[in-house]
Amino acid sequence: MLKDFFMGLSQNQFLNNTAKKYGLKMGAQTVVAGTNIEEAIKSIKELNAHGISCTVDNLGEFVYKEEEAEEAREQILKVIEAIHKHQVDAHISLKPTQLGLDIDYHFCLNNVKEIVDRANNYGIFVNIDMEDYSHLQPTFDLLEDLSLEYENVGTVIQSYFRQAQEYLEKYRNFRIRIVKGAYKESEEIAYPDKKDIDANFIKITEWHLLNGKFTSIATHDHQIINHIKEFVKKNNIPKEKFEFQMLYGFRKDLQLKLASEGYNFCTYVPFGKDWYGYFMRRLAERPQNLNLVAKQVFNKKTNTVLGVAAGAFLLGRMTKKTKKRR
């Protein structure tokens, strides 16, 4: 029920738009690295100082107008220039819908191509993030079209999809980030139970470590991480072939520990004014994520669920008051 609640909030366009006016309220500042490029670069430098690389996401939701997609494209190009200028260890993660996938495929392709081309000039990798199932095949199409000219592109495989192994085998020669999945999907196409999602995550991660190009293992689950550490040791898989990934603001101590142990580690660094949808999805994903955020956002006396729900309720009240004033 909590997942449905927060997923509903994440998809509410009015709440997304209103949240931009109030900045990073309700604790989102702990999991979003600022609202502008300067703040994001500062966060990246701090992570780099600990031997942690970054992948940067310019947050954005509900893009259905060409001018908004073009604005997002220009912002991401500025991020690439900033990465190059400051010589930080970072690459780009982007969402196709932010760049016009829901408007027109070729319009989106041209936007993404311009980004990939600019990044390629500087030797910067671009990861094409996966969204919900309705955008799955068009995103794979983007990857295939871009790969005809560029090698600095990769994508994401979500372990909650029943066909994840099939997708992975098809795109084994790309750099792949493996995640569990953040969207609500039909049981016909996605596993509903955590144990099945976790088991599939381990299965496809092991397969790609043995057969793929480069694997980004994106999880906060220390049990899965420990399992993978034993697996790579047992199979003599060099550390150059994989990295662990976590979200900015989550399990900071574990991030630092893995980096200090000599593993390649990458933090997913989101920034921007359009933070609300991202934040709500992180809260919806797993009960563990609710706990991780609450430990850093709320004090020890605050009940996790009530505290997060109160934050969402507060924003809803703020929007109602705003509407009444109009």
Image: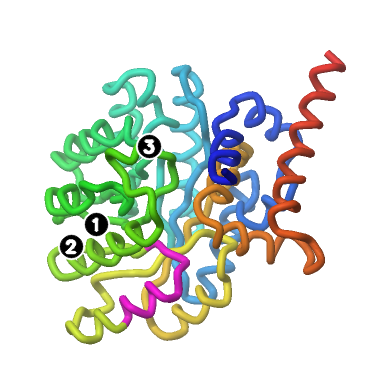
Most prominent secondary structure in the magenta stretch? helix
Q: Is residue 117 visible?
A: no
Residue lying farthest to the top in this orientation:
326
Find the magenta span and give its range. Answer: 218-229
How packed is label 3: few (under 14 Cα within 10 Å), some, or many (20 or more)?
Answer: few
The residue wearing badge 3 is 132
| C-alpha gap between disc 1 and disc 3 | 20 Å
Of the numbered discs 1 and 3, the one sitting upstream in the chain is: 3
- Under circle 3, the secondary element is loop
Of the 4 image quadrants, the one containing the N terminus is top right
Nearest the camera: 67 or 168? 168
Number of numbered markers:
3
Tag 2 and tag 3, C-beta contact below 8 Å? no
Q: Farthest residue in the right direction?
A: 325
Residue 109 placement (x, y as % from top left)? 28, 29
Circle 2 packing at 10 Å, graded few (<14), some (14-19), many (20+), is some
Q: Nearer the viewer, residue 102 or 191?
A: 191
Task: Report the residue at 28% width, 51% height from top.
Answer: 157
Say which residue label 1 marks.
Answer: 175
Residue at point 32%, 56% (across, down)? 177
Q: Earlier in the sequence, mark 1 or mark 2?
A: 1
Q: Which mark is residue 213?
A: 2
Instruction: Tell me the kind of residue under disc 3.
Output: Asp
Q: Is residue 265 left or right of residue 82?
A: left
Of the residues shown, which amino acid type is indicated by label 1?
Arg
